[in-house]
Image: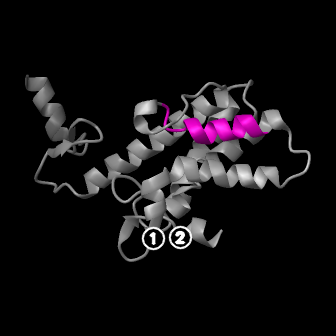
Amino acid sequence: VKEYKASTAAVRYHHAYQGGLLEHSLNVTKICDMLNNLYDNLNRDLLITGAILHDVGKIKEYSSGVNLKITNRGRLLGHITIGYGWVLEKISSIKGFPSDLADRLLHIILSHHGHLEYGSPKRPKILEAFVVYHADHLDGDIGGFNIILENTSDENDWSEYVRNFERPIYTRRLDLGEEDMGDKESG
């Protein structure tokens, strides 16, 4: 728990600071819980557990000292594989743990990046895995977008090219003042 609270969710891009993993996982869990309230056919326990554990391997993938960096284990195995192994080990120690439930939870961890080219050994094949993938992706993108907003000066309307989004981002804040309304009326 102590390591989970102190870990980063990334070295850069989103939630790249101590405590970022907990914040990101909590955001993903809240998004999943909200979606659970919209759809009747989700298993809430599986969904919430998958949301909490989807990035648990990042505890060992990153070192969260003064300088955030990827550990040797992280470079060799990656957080998906580390998390899968950790959760499988815990499940194996629980006598009578339902095998179908174990497979579904482990599938969420393995598929939460959504695509093979993004590091997932499996693509989502159950509804709860689809939801965790999309919630994870959404929170990561919003976190990354907010970092861009924080690091772009007010003088610029556009960020530099952002590799994760494959485009520059429009950063000008929305202003609904009278001046804009006047421009629309005269145009």
Mark in front: 2 vs 1: 1
Q: Would you say residue 52 is visible in this rendering?
A: no
Amino acid type for the residue under numbered disc 2: Ala
Checking the image for residue 64, the label placed there is: 1
Residue drawn where x is 35% and y is 73% of the image: 67
Q: In this view of the protein, which residue sits in the foreground, 151 or 124?
A: 124
Do the CB atoms of the residues marked 2 and 1 lie less than 8 Å apart?
Answer: yes
Q: Would residue 112 be counted in the magenta stretch?
A: yes
Looking at the picture, does residue 150 appear above or below residue 127? below
Residue 47 image point, x, y percent: 69, 39
Q: Would you say residue 97 is visible in this rendering?
A: yes
- Mark 2–mark 1 Cα distance, whole angstroms, equals 7 Å
- Mark 2 or mark 1, earlier in chain: 2
Residue drawn where x is 24% and y is 35% of the image: 166
Residue receiving disc 2: 6
Q: Would residue 81 be counted in the magenta stretch?
A: no
Q: Give the residues drawn in magenta, as a range.
A: 102-114
